[in-house]
């Protein structure tokens, strides 16, 4: 399977950490979490749309991963394996939660924004996140995994169970919809 | 199908660049995880301490007395268990599970291998392989604590197949998964 640059930095060092974790070394696990937390947190936050849910899912992912390592599981690529757990925990969490609630602050900032260089404004990030939450969940998931996490379609298919053709279609539609939403917001 | 044209759009490219910035949810997550793992570790160590084999030295007279007491208790327990459980002469049917376990069954005569992934095994395709029976039915049984689990079968390593005997998961990700609720026993 082709490996994306996004997950290829998992190295021997990761394997060493895993080996220490399996011998009960929590310091090694702390190091592993620190290594992957920013990236896993980014995905959870972008997909779920709020920090509280993202933190809870990330915490759950790390606890489950540690239990699996303690049981004797030996993931070949720790990063990809953690991501697989996270993606599915996000799915389970998403099924139980209300959709993203847009904050009034983001709306106000947008109304005061200039048209010429919208991407330079602080509200830009809020607007992107808001637009992202307007996508159907399957499109948002595929878009994030492909364009933000830079995974290959084969990796995403293995992680999500969707076929590569369906994934490509989801990403295409997500891009079209996002582009439309952002242009509408900024009247480009 | 060609790659999506989205990233060619400057605004979309800028959006993707923005989304790629790491979102650090803070070390609080790590601290809470480590606290939970320390609690679990302490409980595990306590259990191991209680259940580890020990060498006990007793006099021959005391050993005989102890053996007699253990034998008496065993007879009582076996008698009581026989009174409350019905004998089971026939082998388990397809889909039946030993007490305390949940059976998962899939008819897939053409499959070379089938595994079960779900919330209960962190979607690890190596964790729960199914066993093939003579009629092309695959099955396994897992001890699951009470709860609600989303799961699916993976056929031949790549194809996700929903369990047709359980309700589909009501999520909106468009992949075939089912939901099972394990009640308290």
Image: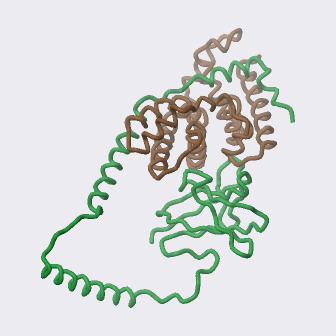
Number of numbered labels in the structure image:
0
Picture coordinates of residue A88, whole percent (x, y): 60, 46
Q: Nearer the viewer, residue B48 or A102?
A: B48
Q: What residue is rendered at 28% in x and 55% in y? A: B46
Q: Nearer the viewer, residue B67 or B40?
A: B67
Picture coordinates of residue A150, whole percent (x, y): 68, 30
Residue A178 figure quarter? top right
The chain letter corresponding to green is B
A177 on left or right of B180: right
Q: Nearer the viewer, residue A83 or A75?
A: A75
Which quarter of the figure is the N terminus of chain B placed in? Answer: top right
Q: What residue is rendered at 47% in x and 89% in y? A: B86
Residue A74 vertical placement versus B59 (above, below)? above
Residue reaching furthest right? B1
Residue reaching furthest front? B60
B22 on left or right of B154: left
B24 on left or right of B113: left
Residue B62 figure quarter? bottom left
Picture coordinates of residue B11, whole percent (x, y): 73, 18
Q: What residue is rendered at 43% in x and 37% in y? A: A29
Q: Nearer the viewer, residue B166 or A115?
A: B166
Which quarter of the figure is the C terminus of chain B placed in? Answer: bottom left
Residue reaching furthest top? A116
Q: Colour of chain A?
A: brown
Q: How is the image coloured?
A: by chain
A149 on left or right of A12: right
Picture coordinates of residue B122, whole percent (x, y): 55, 50
Q: What residue is rendered at 59% in x and 51% in y? A: B124
């Amino acid at each position: 399977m082709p490996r994306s640059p996004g997950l290829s930095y998992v190295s021997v060092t990761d394997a060493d950490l895993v080996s220490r974790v399996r011998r009960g070394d929590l310091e090694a696990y702390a190091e592993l979490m620190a290594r992957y937390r920013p990236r896993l947190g980014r995905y959870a936050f972008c997909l779920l749309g709020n920090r509280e849910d993202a933190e809870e899912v990330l915490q759950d992912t790390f606890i489950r991963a540690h239990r699996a390592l303690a049981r004797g599981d030996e993931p070949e690529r720790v990063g990809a394996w953690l991501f697989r757990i996270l993606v599915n925990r996000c799915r389970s969490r998403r099924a139980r939660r209300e959709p993203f609630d847009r904050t009034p602050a983001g709306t106000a900032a947008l109304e005061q924004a200039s048209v010429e260089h919208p991407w330079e404004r602080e509200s830009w990030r809020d607007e992107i996140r808001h637009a992202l939450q307007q996508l159907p969940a399957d499109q948002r998931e595929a878009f994030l995994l492909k364009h933000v996490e830079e995974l290959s379609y084969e990796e995403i298919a293995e992680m999500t169970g969707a076929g590569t053709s369906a994934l490509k279609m989801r990403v295409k539609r997500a891009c079209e919809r996002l582009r439309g939403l952002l242009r509408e917001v900024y009247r480009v | 199908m060609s790659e999506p044209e989205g990233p060619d759009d400057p605004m979309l490219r800028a959006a993707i660049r923005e989304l790629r910035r790491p979102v650090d949810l803070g070390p609080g997550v790590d601290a809470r995880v480590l606290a939970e793992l320390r609690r679990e570790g302490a409980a595990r160590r306590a259990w191991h301490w209680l259940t580890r084999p020990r060498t006990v030295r007793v006099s021959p007279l005391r050993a005989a007395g102890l053996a007699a007491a253990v034998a008496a208790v065993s007879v009582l327990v076996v008698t009581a268990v026989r009174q409350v459980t019905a004998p089971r002469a026939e082998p388990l049917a397809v889909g039946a599970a030993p007490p305390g376990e949940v059976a998962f069954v899939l008819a897939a005569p053409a499959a070379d291998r089938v595994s079960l992934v779900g919330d209960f095994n962190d979607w690890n395709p190596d964790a729960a392989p199914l066993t093939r029976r003579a009629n092309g039915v695959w099955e396994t049984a897992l001890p699951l604590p009470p709860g609600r689990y989303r799961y699916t079968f993976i056929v031949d390593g790549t194809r996700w197949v929903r369990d047709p005997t359980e309700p589909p998961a009501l999520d909106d990700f468009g992949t075939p998964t089912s939901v099972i609720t394990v009640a308290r026993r």
